[in-house]
Image (cartoon, grey):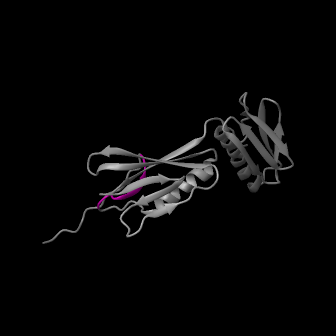
Amino acid sequence: MSRIGKKPIAIPPKVEVTLNGQTITVTGPRGLLKRELHPEVGIELSKTEVAVKRMSDSPLHRSLHGVTRTVIANMIDGVTKGYEKKLEAAGIGWRANVQSKKLVLAVGYSHPVEIDPPAGIEFKAEIVAKPPFGNIPLITVSGNDKEMVGQMAATIRGVREPEPYLGKGIAYVGEKIRRKAGKTSK
């Protein structure tokens, strides 16, 4: 039995969870999240907790058990606390601005890169002082849906991934960039 899957999920006081067939809807102080769950996973809903049950011990049902429980727990956390990821753009003269909800990056290309947020995602950009690069932009991606926040952060990072020789690029805060030595001459 999955250790994660068999734990019941407590429902906080200001959160409402409803189940309509295999569609689960979670409503809380920060908004509403809706998701279609796999048809071969059983959900037991009471006023104070949600429990995930599996049909059998087949590999498919075992794999869905813990994942479904985690997805529902992330939805409940999303409508109560929300999620955010922070990225830093380390490069000389690089800038990040938010213009009418759109993130505009100037990261060494001949043109600015504009990224439109999907519904439920917000961008923030601020300047932070870091020693080797001077002032660098700090980009914050926030929202209620954990998957969407992670995907948007990965999309922003993909605009200019960190490179190992100079350490320039857009990286998550706290991410260790493995540096390589440059060429040596005789």
* Whether residue 2 is visible: no
Q: Farthest residue toward the bottom?
A: 186
Residue 154 in the image, given as x and y percentages of width and height: 52, 57
Q: Position of residue 77 (x, y in %)?
A: 65, 38
Would residue 44 appear left or right of 147 to someone viewing this image? right
Write down the region rendered in magenta: 166-173
Which residue is situated farthest in the front direction here? 100
Q: Nearer the viewer, residue 38 or 111?
A: 111
Report the front residue among 102 and 58: 102
Residue sticking out furthest to the right? 21
- How far from the left and from the top, in percent, is residue 183? 22, 68
Question: Can the viewer see residue 52?
Answer: yes
The image quadrant where one finds the C terminus is bottom left
**Residue pictured at 49% horizontal, 58% vertical:** 156
Q: Residue at x 38, y 68 (%)?
A: 109
Looking at the image, which residue sits at the far top? 13
- Could you tell whether 12 is left or right of 86 in the image? right
Residue 126 is left or right of residue 64, and the answer is left
Picture coordinates of residue 121 (x, y %)?
59, 50
Picture quadrant of residue 108: bottom left
Membership of 113 in magenta stretch: no
